[in-house]
Amino acid sequence: MQELEKAVREVLEHIEDQRQRVDFVKRIIAIRMMQESDPCWCGSKKTVSDCHLKRQNAKTVSVEQQIGLRVGIFKRNRICSASFDSANCETKNIIGAHTIQRNGALKAMAEDGHVGSLYQQVGEVSNVNVKCGVKRIASVFYGFCRKHDNDLFECLEKKPVILNAECLWASSYRAVCHEHYQKMAAIEGAKAQLDFADNGMPLPWQLMMQSEIRYSLTQLEYGLAFISTIKQRFEKISADPQGKLLGWLITFNGPPKLAVSGTFSPFYSLDGQRIQGGETTRHVEHFAISTIMYEENVAWIVACLPEQRIAVSFLEQLFSHSHREIMEILSWAVFAWNENVYFPLSWWEGLSEMDKNALLELVQKANCAAPYENQTFPGSVINQQIRSVIPFPR
């Protein structure tokens, strides 16, 4: 009993709201009164005896093992994202599709066949490491069948990129599908964690852990619903995207330093005003960013649906800044808001330990819900300047 009381006090130290503290203690008391044959309090649909009764004495699952499980789920999750053309899908031929041009941007960035990437992990900053990814597998996800990967992105992978509506749609749709795929895999990973993440913990910490995972699941499911709506809109315009997307091409001077593919959903404007999320909006809008080769140089494409006025307003505000400021803002956002980011390993090795630690901390702690506050880092260490910002298609 003393150990239980000690654990309750430890958990309560992490709960600031008094009402939530009271509710937590009441739940602990109610759980202690449950019978072994009752449905388990965690919602697993198992009985207490088959679920949490012996969880405290179960073998603890390390952070590394949990990460390995989530990575495994990501790799096993094989679907074709092109649901709008399912009749022509080769469902038995799902391939490792690149989100970034393998023979374009990744090849230009690779050194001895490798590119660097920061993998966001659970736990302390020390658990975030630089990965030497072979360009053959870097940026890969199992989100398209061979037919759709070949057909939908032919204008990016097999032809010189042209600034037209087809290219804008293809580059952005691939980024949206990758985000959709990640959300689905993250949900499966969170569901799996419910069965083992609280192994070896006393009851109060089990309750705390289960509550946190279920809250995370709820947020992921909201996020999946939001990106699904955007994905469906992209699919509706797939046959004729002309005039139905807004895009900007960002070109750089010098060799490539960053390649990225994903979607961003900023909760704050660049002057710190809340623009979406929470009670501000019921739907969270996104804009896409992708990396291509354009006229033999690496470039970024930023795009959004014109009806998403919050995202459009954010991008218009972004591109009203100077090229230096745009680079600083996007460099911060790329690392803070996205995990599908790649860079030359020599660039990473050339950073000071202080800059490496600062970058790792940014990757670990920031997200789209954090406001931009005029940060000059990491733009100050990327050593790349924007040459031009070109709206397209014109």
Image: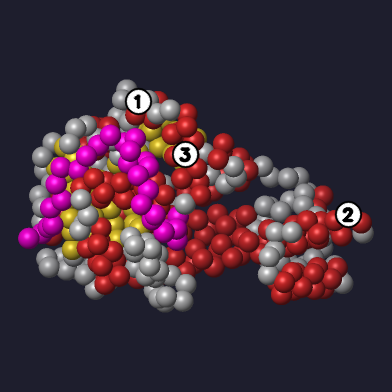
Q: Is residue 57 left or right of residue 219?
A: right
Residue type at tag 1: Ser
Residue furthest left as drawn? 394
Q: Which residues are magenta?
A: 367-394
Tell me the mark number nearer the camera, choosing from 3 and 2.
3
Quadrant in the picture for the C terminus: bottom left
Where, by quadrant of the figure, is residue 283 drawn?
A: bottom left
User: Relative to 37, is 385 above or below?
Assistant: above
> Between disc 1 and disc 2, whose residue precedes?
2
Percent coordinates x, y for residue 194 in the rendering: 65, 58
Q: Secondary structure at mark 2?
A: helix
| Distance in Å between CA atoms under marks 1 and 2 | 51 Å
At 67% across and 52% down in the image, what residue appears?
A: 197
Percent coordinates x, y for residue 320 in the rendering: 20, 58
At 51% across and 49% down in the image, what residue appears?
A: 365
Where, by quadrant of the figure, is residue 110 drawn?
A: top left
User: Relative to 393, is 277 above or below?
Assistant: below
Quick check: can you spot residue 207?
A: yes
Residue type at tag 3: Ala
Percent coordinates x, y for residue 40 in the rendering: 76, 68
Residue under pointer 2: 3
| Distance in Å between CA atoms under marks 3 and 1 | 18 Å
User: Relative to 37, is 156 above or below?
Assistant: above
Label disc, if present, on residue 346 of the rendered structure: 1
Residue type at tag 2: Glu
Q: Secondary structure at mark 1?
A: helix
Q: Are marks 1 and 2 in contact (CB under 8 Å)?
A: no
